[in-house]
Image: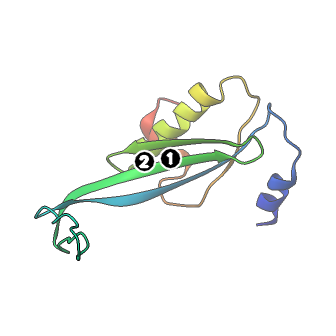
Amino acid sequence: MEDILEGYRRPYDPAYPVVCMDESSKQLIGEVSKPIPAAPGHPKLEDDEYVRNGVAEIFLEVEPLAGRRHVEVTEHRTRIDWANNIKNMLDLRYPGVKKVILVMDNLNTHDIASLYEAFHP
């Protein structure tokens, strides 16, 4: 934990950006019946019943010292999705840097094996 906190105390250096990455799954839901619009004397009425339309995975990168963020949405949360997100981050958003200091949790897909599964060594 102390290593992470030290990373946040570094002075800003564009050649060594500190990027925090996290991801979250969100359920996509739809309505079974249309809401009844609000009218004088009663609010908009919505039924609690819903239909499940799958999930979306949200990848979020934040570079707090530079005030930058990037959001990527995918249909799945797989090793390949995570590896592609890392590749795009390095190739597209940080192409000229010497090293990205990446801060992330230890989710089972966040490891070197994911990169080897997605790309040739």
Residue type beneath disc 2: Arg
Dot 1 crowding, Cα within 10 Å, few <14, some 14–19, many 20+: few
- Classify residue 46 as left or right of residue 109: left
Q: Which amino acid lies under the numbered mark 1 shown in the image of this protein? A: Ala
Q: Which structural element holds mark 1?
A: helix
Q: Residue at x 79, y 36 (%)?
A: 16
Residue 43: give its label.
none
Query: How much space separates mark 2 and mark 1, taking CA atoms?
Result: 8 Å
Q: Position of residue 23 (x, y in %)?
A: 49, 55
- Residue at 57% across, 61% down: 106
Q: Residue 42: give x, y in percent of width and height.
A: 23, 76
Residue topped by disc 1: 113
Residues tagged 2 and 1 counted as in contact (Cβ below 8 A): yes
Pick whichever, 35 or 56, lies toward us.
35
Residue 34, percent from left and from top: 13, 61
Q: Which mark is residue 79?
A: 2
**Residue 34 placement, left or right of 14:** left
Of all residues shown, which one is farthest toward the top?
96
The quarter in which the N terminus is drawn is: bottom right
Asked which quadrant contains residue 19, the reply is top right
Q: Name the spot of residue 41 as percent of width and height, x first.
A: 23, 76
